[in-house]
Amino acid sequence: MRVKLSAMRVRNELVRRIEELSGQDLLACYQCGKCSAGCPAAFAMDLLPSQVIRLVQLGLVEEVLNAKTPWFCAACQTCYARCPKGVDLSRIMEAIREIALQERGDYLVIEEIPAEELAEFPQLAFISGFRKYTA
Amino acid sequence: MRIAYFPGCTLNTTAKGFDNALRASFAALGAELVELPEWNCCGATFPLLVDNMLDLAAPTRVLLAAQEQGDRLAVACTMCYNVIRRTNNRLRADADALEKLNYFIEAEYRGGVEVLDVLQILRDDVGFEAVQAAVKQPLTGLKVAAYYGCMVLRPPAEVAYDDPENPHALDDLLRALGAEPVEWPHKAECCGAYLAVKSKEATAEMSYRILSSAQRTGAQAVVTNCPLCQFNLDRQQLDMGRRHGGYQPVPVLYFSQLLGVALGLDMADFGWERHYVDVRPLLESLG
Ligand code: SF4
Ligand code: SF4
């Protein structure tokens, strides 16, 4: 992928919001890829977790907001537990979801959940699902 | 020993068997779990945005309820444990957050409660040796895969009371019950958690990886401490055979159920009927 970088783009407002919401230093990541290697949901993602952070480092937040990856992050914390730089990628994923939810609306709509699932699923599945997937 | 106990919403309803078996087993071991007289939902997931104070209010109220009963809180649901423990860590480390939350809930939580997972209490307070001595019906010959999921392990510095990459507390308990825990690589792998409400295929694949890994070792059951893992791993097996030809279902149990069985307790209310993969053949094989 060919991208044109500028100081303004790299430090754009969305990048700063992700930093602020997640409390993480994006530039601490040196792209070792350990997060992606251990992510249990990587097979279902269109961008690997390390690619998400790389794109944000370059100011390419739109690419990340358009990706499936943040919605497939299960907040399992494996990436954070193993990151040699102490980057909490699960918080960066949450910040990206938050921006997407505010700009684009809820990802999970209660009316779309099949009735049998509403009856069978344990409470904590829904409560955590709504916490992650709705604004 | 008496200890304040937070069951949480799921153990009060769909995972009632986990709760019943746990309370009965603790009582048989001379440790009483005393349910908080009043409690509310903890929110199920720890808020990961630094400024999300609102979602800390519910777990702070649980801590406040615990403070009225003493200085330790036992939590059985691992998701609740993770949320309440991480909230407590935040409030202890951040005086400003504590003040805001107290203002918000109109009370004074002081940060003094120790949040403990029930398995940790079994290990450190009751002791696995005492558990072993109380076993009436050893689970001899039962090969089990101890499965920990995420919530009692990560983030390690905040919640783990065991080796976060190769935990063994549950293995040790099962060994004390006479069972034979297998070595396997997926004991700390995520089941997909809440992805189940939106992304069926991803959760099905995550469950399959875990379950097939357990089965390759010859495990006859997967044993867990998390109600969401139990549900995901169990229910996903309903149509696993369709995606993976020749797949043989394996029961997914709570450790408290096997503990109760080994202690020789009345297991009528252990919630067996709620399992998707029938557990009864396994129980009968134990005699
Ligand atoms: S493990 Fe940490 S440093 Fe390595 S790529 Fe992932 S976020 Fe970056
Ligand atoms: S927290 Fe999300 S990105 Fe990190 S390993 Fe787990 S699923 Fe992957």
Image (spheres, rainbow, N blue to C red):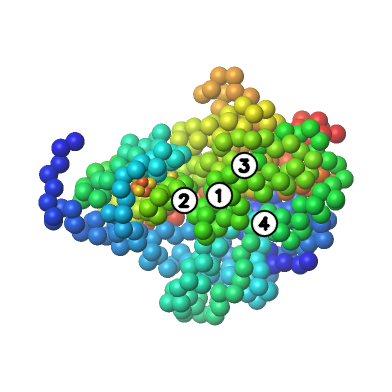
Amino acid type of the residue that numbered disc 1 sits on in the rendered structure: Pro
Picture quadrant where residue B184 is located: top right
Mark with earlier residue (3, 4): 4
Q: Name the residue under label 3.
A: B147
Q: Name the residue under label 4.
A: B120
* Chain letter of the residue beneath label 3 in the structure image: B
Q: Look at 37% across and 66% down and name the residue there.
A: B51
Q: Looking at the image, is B163 positioned above or below residue B208?
A: below
Picture quadrant where residue B237 is located: top right
Q: Name the residue under label 1.
A: B164
3D distance between C-alphas at marks 2 and 3: 18 Å
Q: How crowded is mark 2: few (under 14 residues within 10 Å), some or many (20 or more)?
A: many
Q: Name the residue under label 2.
A: A81
Q: Are marks 3 and 4 on the same chain?
A: yes
Res A64 visible: yes
Q: Look at 59% across and 40% down and name the residue there.
A: B187
Which of pointers 3 and 1 indicates the residue nearer the eye?
1
3D distance between C-alphas at marks 3 and 1: 12 Å
* Chain letter of the residue beneath label 4 in the structure image: B
Point out residue B84 in the picture as x, y percentages from the top left corner: 55, 63
As helix, strand or loop, the secondary structure at mark 1 comes to loop
Amino acid type of the residue that numbered disc 4 sits on in the rendered structure: Gln
Cβ–Cβ below 8 Å for labels 1 and 2?
yes
Choose between A115 and B54: the one closer to the eye.
B54
As helix, strand or loop, the secondary structure at mark 4 comes to helix
Which of pointers 1 and 4 indicates the residue nearer the eye?
1
As helix, strand or loop, the secondary structure at mark 2 comes to helix
Choose between B41 and B130: the one closer to the eye.
B130
